[in-house]
Image: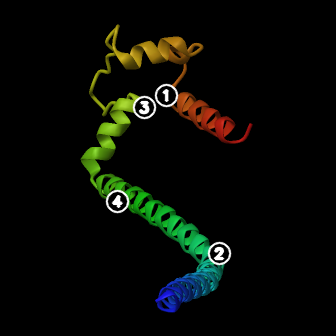
Amino acid sequence: MARRGDRDRFSTATSLRLLGEQTAARVYRSQNRRQARRSRLTGRAAFLALIVCSLVVALAYPMRQYVSQRADIADQERRIDEAREVVEQLRDEKARLQDDMYIQRLAREHLHLVHPGETGYIMIGSEAAERRRSEEGAADRPWYSNVWDGVDKADRKQHP
């Protein structure tokens, strides 16, 4: 009986030792697998990060050029619209200048032209009279002198 108890005790101690070794081996294998998974994941993540960075670097300059060109196109389209508006205004002005009545009205307003037999009056307090009074002796000169003075003043404004 003593032998049997020793054997049971021996077998229990042996079985516990074996069980401990097996558990330790399982823990070691799972740690190795986890580390292997981590290292594989880290390698994959590094490769993915490298690809993403390469794409960003490869696309950064073309995207900047694209945005810059779109801004230039928008600016040119704005200029085209402005030029079209100016052309439309000039066409309207050209059409108005084809009308004899419009030309006569401009001559009467700006040059104070009167037809033969008419008497010209300048209303005091009117805008034209104020403008003429502010000019040096403009009322005392003939109208064609005022026209040439206006041409000279316009030329001086363009060519300092």
Q: Earlier in the sequence, mark 2 or mark 1?
A: 2
Secondary element type, mark 3: helix
The answer to whether one can see residue 136 in this image is: yes
Q: For the residues marked 3 and 1, what is the alpha-carbon distance in whole angstroms? A: 6 Å
Give the mark nearer the N terminus: 2 vs 4. Answer: 2
Figure quadrant of residue 136: top right
Three-letter code for the amino acid on which mark 4 is drawn: Glu
Q: Any mark on residue 111, and which?
A: 3
Residue under label 2: 61
Cβ–Cβ under 8 Å for marks 1 and 4: no
Residue 125's mark? none
Query: Does residue 66 appear left or right of residue 158 in this picture?
Result: left
Residue position for label 4:
88
Q: Are marks 3 and 4 in contact (CB under 8 Å)?
A: no
Which of the image's four quarters has the C terminus? top right
Nearer the viewer's eye, disc 3 or disc 4? Answer: 4
- Dots 3, 1 in contact, CB < 8 A: yes
Answer with mark 1 or mark 4, whichever residue precedes in sequence.
Answer: 4
Label 1, on which residue? 143
- Viewer-nearest residue: 8 or 88: 8
